Image (cartoon, helix red, strand yellow):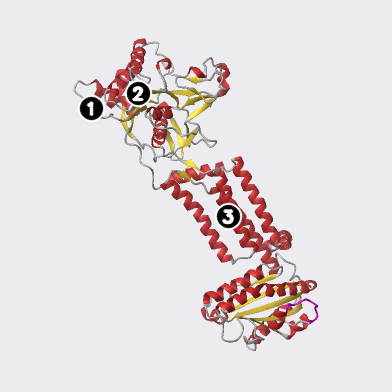
Amino acid sequence: MAAANFSQRWLRPVLLGLSSFSNRLANKFYIALAIIIGALAIYAMVTGATSGMKNKAYDLIMKSRFHYPAADPNIVIVDIDESALAAMAPEYGRWPWPRNIMGELVEGIAAQKPQAIVFDISFSDPDVFNAAGDKFFRDVIARTPNTFFPSIRLDESNDHLSQFKVKQLPGVTKLDDSASDSATMAVILPFFFDALKDHRLGTINIYTDEDGLARTYDVYADEYGWRVSSLPANVVSALGTALPDRQEILINWRGKPPAYAHVSFSDIYFDLQKQKKTRPPNEFADKIVIIGSTAATLFDIKTTPVAKLHPGVEILATAIDNLKHADYLTELPYEIYIFISLVAIVLLTVAFVYNIDQRVVNLTFTVLQTGFLAVSYLTLNFSTVFVDLTAPFTFSLLYFTIARFNSTFTGFYRSGHPLFSKMLDDGSECRVIFAQCHIHIKNRNARLRLGATFKRYVGASEYGVVTPPFFKGLPVLHAFFQHTLIFYWLVPKQKEIPALQDLISMLEQSIPAVRKSARRHARANGSVVTWLLHGFVFTVDAEEVWRLHGEEGMAKLFAETSAVGSTGSGGVMHIAMTKEFARFCQTTDLKISDELRNAGLKCN
């Protein structure tokens, strides 16, 4: 009872207003909606407001990928892991260890002729308690030109506090002539940075997005007109690989860590100290050796789409791998996504404006949306192009949802649904016009096509209602009526003339389609289509006598069907009228074409 009161008192006024508004606007609603959502799509993609959707799609696909590119087997991580920290502690103490240990490690690995030795460790301060160890390390790296070291870019708000000039960085170049020679930057450098010539020093900053996830890696940064390269870029450039002409890359992850070969720092170091070594003498030959840490206690951990705890050294390795093989992810220009979104919205608009069969629209829309998702997913599995169709998916879904609601409201309004229309309120005087259609074509597909055309024209009319198939779930009864279509126009009595005009206009519009079917599926004699028109006026009363009137009207419509043949006056369409309809029609002065007159629609 409470639910009924709520529906009548609060819900019904809202639905009445919405449905009346929808019916009044008709097709203008779909066109206006297309303009609004199209403009919204353009604005959102131009301003980057859809980047959040893009990131979520990227994350989801990366997590659920079934085909990851293989990690480069020639990239090896010498890992300062928890076991290495524990193994080294008795003799060398807690981290950080004396620098001579690093020097000895570099000497041992360099002897095997690796492509590069890359440190993911910051050596920002000299060891005041072991100057000899620092000197030894410095001497080793000075004579080992394929060693690379990181710098850490601090927040640019601190640049004015720094006395270090950008141009002092090894390997920096001017991006343009306006680069300032006096520009300073806040940066953490190795204490021996002056010993690093050319491009052996690069930044290792991993910048996360607003949600805290790392998805990109810098190729270089524009620092006051100076090109400051990242560590991966300098390593790959030194190996002779061309760098992309972009400031950052979207990382093509190799799967969850560990994706690369790891060897424990302590295992390597202790083996190098042995007189008789047990490890392969060419273990690191032609390899890119990265020395870093996966130990959680050293806090070099980031969150990425593939792992909540992703060691920074693995991210560094992935960036080097991406640049080395040029298989980082590329993105399509946003203009393409705008075009796809607008095309999808236009197609949906056409479908609703021309009242394409709802089942066809729903199926097509489902296939379209599934295609958007499938293309995004598959391209990221089998290519290096990230085709992000979440924006077209979202904006077309938004359009479809609103348009479908509007279509539903309009249908309920025209059909007299008590929550959406006042036409069947007590005391209302209404006119109902029935149009029963029989299609006399044996070819099933042709019959269905012509029926769909009639449904489209009726649905696109101002007052017409398309009824669902009779007895759809009951095969025998449905078979009796499967070639029969019923349409009706339900309007207040004062709108009966516009409703009749609406029916006549629909019949006029359908003539070319009927002619076309007649040419393709000519019958020996008779018409392709027969229409039986019936109508009556009723007043809604509390005793529900009007329902009995309606039942009698429907019974009369079906009773007269048997008396109507498929022959008219030789035309492709035959129109028959009940006496009630004929009397009503004759009270009007509507213009009727000669073709409809010849078919049997004679009102005056």
- Badge 3 element: helix
- Identify the mark at residue 281; answer none if there is no mark: 1
Kindly identify the amino acid type of the residue bearing the numbered disc 3.
Answer: Ala
Question: What crowding class fits label 3: few (fewer than 14 Cα within 10 Å), some (14-19), or many (20 or more)?
Answer: many
Task: Kindly indicate whether the residue at mark 2 contacts the one at mark 3 (C-beta within 8 angstroms).
Answer: no
Q: Quadrant of residue 559?
A: bottom right
Relative placement, left or right, of 338 versus 258 is right
Front residue (pair 34, 370): 34
Circle 1 SS class? loop
Q: Nearer the viewer, mark 1 or mark 3?
A: 3
Instruction: Specify which label sits upstream in the sequence, 3 or 2.
Output: 2
- Mark 2, residue position: 146
Quadrant location of the N terminus? bottom right
Q: Is residue 429 visible?
A: no
Q: Amino acid at mark 1?
A: Pro
In this picture, is 562 found above or below 175? below
Q: Nearer the viewer, mark 2 or mark 1?
A: 2
Q: Which residue is mark 3?
A: 344
